[in-house]
Amino acid sequence: MAHTFADSRRWMTDGTTLLADEVAGLTEQEYDAPTLLPGWTRRHLVAHVAANADALGHLVHWAATGDETPMYSSPQDRAAGIERGTSMSADELGEWLHGSADRLAAAMAELSDEQWAAPVVTAQGRTVPATETPWMRSREVWVHVVDLDRGHRFEDLPPDFLTALVEDITARRGEVPPVDGPLPQVAAWLAGRPHTLTDAPALAPWL
């Protein structure tokens, strides 16, 4: 792996702060603007990120207590959380984003070394140690801060994070052709986002 547990914790903290800063002060009209994800406004995106923190909190609870609490009860439950955000006000979305992130960070801070090592199951059905959850959250906040379309691009993300992201997506996607290019553009391509690579085949959005 291209990163450590400490890296993941750092990226999660820094990415969460940046995303919160980008969302702070958005007007109702700005929340209705499109994102880089087809069909999603910023309301959809912020609701998704907030719901993701709550869902990862379920895995942290699982690790802490042994009580099997999946991220989402069903795919429909996940979709409903995102859709619920489209009818929330800017203030409500901001409170949900901040509150869910704070709850997740607080729950993680309480885990012992033994609890961090406990196995949990992701929404994709992978069994992983709880130490994987900060990395899962890091991917969400950093990639989606670009998706907000507020001026941040993959070139603005930490290079060490991008290296880990490329390794992770490549492993998850399976067979993808090798493509040469600047690291941020390769990461954007692998994530199914806009990029400047000329010979890379189209990929569906990831995350």
Image (cartoon, grey):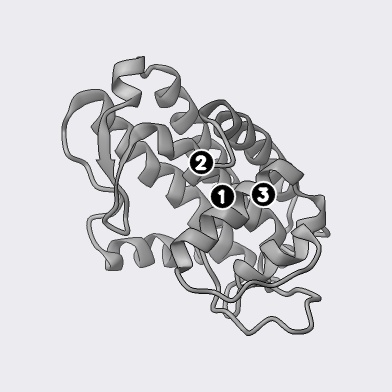
Number of the label disc, if any, that sits on residue 84: none
Tell me if label 1 and label 2 are in contact, CB under 8 Å: yes
Of marks 3 and 1, the one in the foreground: 3
The quarter of the picture where residue 41 lies is: bottom right
Position of 131 relative to 26 (above/below): above
Identity of the residue drawn at 43% across and 51% down: 51
Chain-order first, disc 3 or disc 1: 1
Inspect the image, locate mark 1, and give the three-letter code of the amino acid beneath it.
Arg
What secondary structure is marked by label 3?
helix
Question: Dot 3, crowdedness within 10 Å: few (<14), some or many (≥20)?
Answer: some
**Where residue 79 sits in the image (x, y, percent)?**
37, 67
Q: CA distance from mark 2 to mark 3?
A: 13 Å
Q: Position of residue 20 (x, y in %)?
A: 67, 42
- Compared across the picture, whether 51 is left or right of 39 comes to left
Bin the neighbour count of mark 1 within 10 Å (Cα to Cα): few under 14, some 14-19, many 20 and up: many
Disc 3 target residue? 163
Q: CA distance from mark 3 to mark 1?
A: 12 Å
Q: Point out residue 5 in the picture as x, y percentages from the top left corner.
A: 51, 29
Left or right of 193? Residue 134 is: left
Residue type, mark 2 in image:
Trp
Residue 139 - label: 1
**Nearer to me, 40 or 140:** 140
Residue 12: which quarter of the image?
top right
Q: Residue 19 at what x, y percent from top left? A: 68, 46
